[in-house]
Image: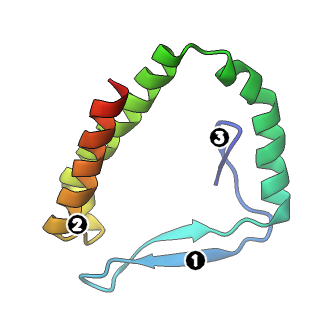
Amino acid sequence: MWIAGKWVEVESGRRYPVFNPATAEEIAQLLLGDKNEVDKAVAADSKTFPVWSAKPQSELSQIAMKIVVRLRVALRGPEGHRVGLRFDRVQVLTDGCDALHMTVS
């Protein structure tokens, strides 16, 4: 789980399997956080929010665009196929990325 800029293990140790729908192969495990992880994330956000909220909109838009570009590349590339995304679903998701790109640029 990503909290305060680093990967942390959840205290409960609980995980949820993720399966490729095309092959039924387990491809990942999601960490299931609880109140402790929520409290850590809120505390971390309380420290970083003043910094983020002071950034100009143009800088926030540039950061959002970097995320959109990486997401678009991941969905259209091998990662999208690895997790079993069908082409039509990839197209819908990447069209959404394109729409977001036009919105923030």
Q: Position of residue 29 (x, y in %)?
A: 52, 71
Give the x, y percent position of residue 47: 81, 29
Q: Which residue is mark 2?
A: 89
**As shown in the figure, which amino acid type bears the numbered disc 2?**
Arg
Q: Earlier in the sequence, mark 1 or mark 3?
A: 3
Q: Earlier in the sequence, mark 1 or mark 2?
A: 1
Residue that label 3 marks: 6
Q: Residues within 10 Å of mark 3 (few under 14, many from 20)?
A: few
The image quarter containing residue 9 is bottom right
Measured in 3D between alpha carbons, the distance from the residue under mark 3 to the one under mark 2, in whole angstroms, is 31 Å
Among the 4 quarters of the image, the one containing residue 54 = top right
Residue type of the residue flagged with mark 1: Tyr
In the image, residue 44 above or below residue 92: above
Q: Rounded to the nearest whole Å, what is the CA distance between mark 1 and mark 2?
A: 23 Å
Q: Position of residue 72 (x, y in %)?
A: 26, 45
Crowd rating for badge 2 (residues with CA inside 10 Å; few <14, some 14–19, many 20+): few
Residue under the image location 17 percent in, 58 percent down? 91
Give the amino acid type for the residue marked by disc 3 in the picture. Answer: Lys
Between label 3 and label 2, give the one nearer the viewer.
2
Residue position for label 1:
16
Which quarter shows the N terminus? bottom right
User: Residue at 14% across / 66% down in the picture?
Assistant: 87
Q: Quadrant of the C terminus?
A: top left
In this view, the residue in front, 37 or 99, is 99
Does 22 sit left or right of 46 as displayed? left
Q: Are marks 1 and 2 in contact (CB under 8 Å)?
A: no
Q: Quadrant of residue 49?
A: top right
Q: Is residue 63 above or below residue 87?
A: above
Q: Is residue 102 above or below residue 37?
A: above
Q: Give the farthest residue toward the front.
A: 103
